[in-house]
Image (spheres, grey):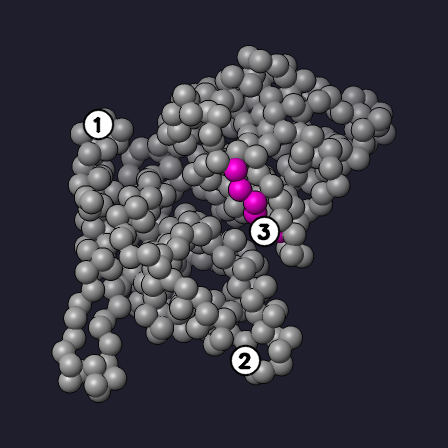
C-alpha cells in the first residue's frame, strides 16, 4: 500500500490537483505520521517492565479556508493507515455521542463521568480523525479540555481539520476563558498546519453553475446530479450506488439521509419539510454537511403553511452554519411563497436564499460565524 505522499503526487500527476506548497507540506507531515502509526516505535524489555510505553505519534490539526483540500488529505491519510482500530467521524457527530455517553455515566452516579467515557473512547481507537472541528455551544466547550487531555494521555493520536486556527475556535463563545485550556492543549500536543492555498476546489467544481434551478423536473434533477458528482468525485456510472447514512439528532433520534458523500447530502423537500421535524433535525444537518442539495421544492402559501414554516427553520439553520445550498424548485425565491397569511414571515427566508447564491456566501467556510 502506498503512503500519503505517493497518493498525493499521483493526484497531481493526473491533473486533479494543482501545485500547492501548503498541501505538500501537509501531505509530507501526514506521510510521516501514518508511517509512525503503522510501524510504532518499540521499547526494550527493561523499559516495559518499568511500566513505560512507546511514544504516541504526535497528531495534526489542519486548518484553512473552504475547499483547500483538508478533507482530501484526511482521506488519503485515513486510507493509508493500516491499523484496524482507527475511526473517522464528523466532529459534531462525535460530540453528540460524547454527550450521550456522559448522560449514561451520570445516571450511574459513580463520580466524575469524563474519565470512564474518555477511557472507553481511547480503548476503541488508536487513531481518531475528525472532520470540521468547530465549537459553537458552551456544553461542548466546557468538557473538551478535560476529555482530550485524557484521550491523548491514553495513547490516542488525533488528526483533525477545521476552517479556523485553534486560537479562533469558540471565538465569541460564552465563558470562553474556560475553553482556553483546550486551545493550549491543541497547540501543545498537535502540530498545527495551515492550508490556505490559492485554489478553492469546492467552489471551482461548482464551475460558476447556478445553485437554484427552476422549474422542478428532469432537467433540474440532472443538473443537480452533475453538481453532486463534481463535488464528490463520484463516478456518474455508479449513481445507483451512492451511499446513504443515518445521522444522530439530539434526543436520541436518528435521521435517514438518502444520499451522501464527502460532506454533501441530497434530500427531497417532502422528506425534509413534509414530515414533522424541528430545529434539532435541521441543526444536525447543518452541522454535519457543508453542502445540501434539495429537490422538489414547491410553491408555498397558506394552504401548506406548516411545510413553509419548517422550510424557514431549515434555511435559518443552513444559513447560520454557512451551508451551501443547491436546489430545484417550482419558482425563484422571490416567487416561492404566494401572497397571503405567512408571506411576511417568509420575506427573511427569501432574502437569505438570495444571499446564499452570492459569491461571498459560497466562498465562506462551513460553520463560520
Please report whichever mark, 1 or 3, sits nearer to the chain's N-terminal start. 1
Which quadrant of the figure contains the N terminus? top left
Instruction: Decide whether residue 246 is among the magenta residues.
Output: yes
Residue 227 on the magenta segment: no
| C-alpha separation, residue under disc 1 versus residue under disc 3 | 37 Å
The answer to whether residue 113 is seen in the rendering is yes
When asked about the image quadrant of residue 332, the answer is top right
Q: Is residue 33 left or right of residue 343?
A: left
Classify mark 1: helix, strand or loop. Answer: loop
- Disc 2 residue crowd, few under 14, some 14–19, many 20+, Cα 10 Å: few
Of callouts 1 and 2, the N-terminal one = 1
Left or right: where 69 falls relative to 8: right
Tag 1–tag 3 contact (CB < 8 Å): no
Magenta span of residues: 244-249
**Label total for image:** 3
User: Relative to residue 50, is residue 240 drawn left or right?
Assistant: right
- Residue drawn at (58%, 83%) of the image: 110
Q: Which mark is residue 14?
A: 1
Classify 85 as above or below 367: below
Callouts 3 and 2 close, C-beta under 8 Å: no
Nearer-N-terminus badge (3/2): 2
Dot 1: within a 10 Å radius of its alpha carbon, few (fewer than 14), some, or many (20 or more) residues?
Answer: few
As helix, strand or loop, the secondary structure at mark 2 comes to: loop
- Depth check, mark 1 against mark 3: the one in front is 3
Q: Mark 2 points at which residue?
A: 112
Residue 73 point in image, percent of width and height:
30, 44
In space, the residues marked 3 and 2 are separated at their CA atoms by 25 Å
> Residue extending furthest top?
219
Q: Which of 54 and 31 is in front in this view?
A: 54
Amino acid at each position: 500500500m502506498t503512503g500519503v505522499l505517493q497518493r498525493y503526487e499521483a493526484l497531481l500527476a493526473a491533473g486533479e490537483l494543482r501545485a500547492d506548497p501548503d498541501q505538500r507540506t501537509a501531505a509530507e507531515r501526514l506521510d510521516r505520521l501514518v508511517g509512525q502509526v503503522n510501524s510504532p516505535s518499540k521499547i526494550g524489555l527493561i523499559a516495559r517492565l518499568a511500566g513505560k510505553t512507546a511514544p504516541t505519534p504526535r497528531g495534526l490539526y489542519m486548518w484553512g479556508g473552504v475547499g483547500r483540500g483538508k478533507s482530501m488529505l484526511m482521506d488519503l491519510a485515513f486510507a493509508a493507515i493500516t491499523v484496524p482500530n482507527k475511526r473517522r467521524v464528523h466532529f459534531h457527530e462525535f460530540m453528540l455521542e460524547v454527550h450521550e455517553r456522559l448522560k449514561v455515566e451520570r445516571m450511574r452516579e459513580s463520580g466524575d463521568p469524563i474519565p470512564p467515557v474518555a477511557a472507553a473512547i481511547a480503548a476503541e481507537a488508536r487513531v481518531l480523525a475528525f472532520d470540521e472541528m468547530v465549537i459553537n455551544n458552551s456544553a461542548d466547550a466546557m468538557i473538551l479540555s478535560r476529555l482530550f487531555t485524557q484521550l491523548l494521555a491514553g495513547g490516542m493520536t488525533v488528526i483533525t481539520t477545521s476552517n479556523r486556527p485553534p486560537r479562533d475556535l469558540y471565538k465569541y463563545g460564552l465563558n470562553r476563558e474556560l475553553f482556553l485550556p483546550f486551545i493550549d492543549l491543541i497547540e501543545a500536543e498537535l502540530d498545527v498546519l495551515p492550508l490556505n492555498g490559492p485554489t478553492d476546489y469546492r467552489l471551482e467544481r461548482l464551475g460558476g453553475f447556478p445553485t437554484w434551478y427552476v422549474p422542478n423536473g428532469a432537467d433540474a434533477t440532472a443538473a443537480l446530479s452533475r453538481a453532486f458528482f463534481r463535488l464528490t468525485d463520484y463516478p456518474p456510472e455508479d449513481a445507483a450506488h451512492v451511499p446513504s447514512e443515518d445521522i444522530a439528532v439530539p434526543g436520541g433520534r436518528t435521521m435517514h439521509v438518502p444520499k451522501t458523500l464527502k460532506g454533501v447530502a441530497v434530500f427531497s423537500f417532502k422528506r425534509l419539510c413534509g414530515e414533522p421535524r424541528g430545529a434539532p433535525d435541521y441543526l444536525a444537518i447543518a452541522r454535519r454537511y457543508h453542502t445540501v442539495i434539495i429537490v422538489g421544492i414547491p410553491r408555498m402559501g397558506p394552504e401548506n403553511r406548516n411545510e413553509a414554516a419548517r422550510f424557514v427553520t431549515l434555511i435559518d439553520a443552513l444559513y447560520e452554519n454557512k451551508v451551501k445550498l443547491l436546489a430545484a424548485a417550482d419558482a425563484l425565491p422571490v416567487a416561492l411563497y404566494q401572497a397571503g397569511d405567512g408571506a411576511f414571515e417568509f420575506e427573511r427566508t427569501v432574502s437569505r436564499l438570495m444571499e446564499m447564491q452570492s459569491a461571498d456566501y459560497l466562498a465562506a467556510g462551513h460553520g463560520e460565524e
